[in-house]
Amino acid sequence: MRDLCSGAYQPGKCADFFTLDLNHIAYAGGLADPVAAIVFCAPTGARHTVVGGRLIVEDGEIATIDMAPVIRDHNRYAARLAALDA
């Protein structure tokens, strides 16, 4: 049975996709075969990501949460882990 929610970019359909900026040094030489570039050039990050029609990444930045507290917590935990190694 075919999923009626997917398979086409149309109003009312689910939309999961991402875009990459192939004019980035990480993709140098990959314009001739963008699919191979994604596989072999180690993508640095999505330019835009949409999941279920919801924008998750916009212009390379996470659009769904405030990243400042996440980064602050991460740095605090990383410092604690580094202190354990001392």
Image (tube, rainbow, N blue to C red):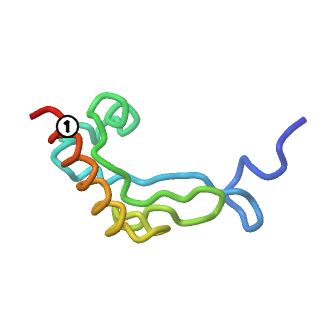
x 53%, y 66%: residue: 55
Q: Is residue 68 above or below residue 4?
A: below
Q: Position of residue 11 (x, y in %)?
A: 73, 68
Q: Nearer the viewer, residue 64 or 33?
A: 64
Would you say 3 lies left or right of 79 here? right
Q: Classify residue 54 by image quadrant.
A: bottom right
Q: How many marks?
A: 1
Residue 42 horizontal side relative to residue 17, left or right: left
Residue type for callout 1? Gly
Identify which residue is drawn at 26% across, 37% down. 30
The answer to whether 15 appears left or right of 25 in the picture is: right
Q: Position of residue 77 (x, y in %)?
A: 28, 49
Q: Secondary structure at mark 1?
A: loop
Q: Residue at x 85, y 39 (%)?
A: 2
Crowd around label 1: few <14 · some 14–19 · many ≥20 (10 Å): few
Q: Quadrant of residue 83?
A: top left
Seen in the image, is 6 located left or right of residue 52? right
From the image, which quarter does the C terminus lie in? top left
Say which residue label 1 marks. 29
- Quadrant into which the N terminus falls: top right
Q: 64 and 39: which one is in front?
A: 64
Task: Identify which residue, 62 or 18, lies in the foreground.
Answer: 62
Quick one: which residue is furthest to the right in this view? 1
Q: Position of residue 52 (x, y in %)?
A: 66, 58
Residue drawn at x 71%, y 57% as measured from the top left: 14
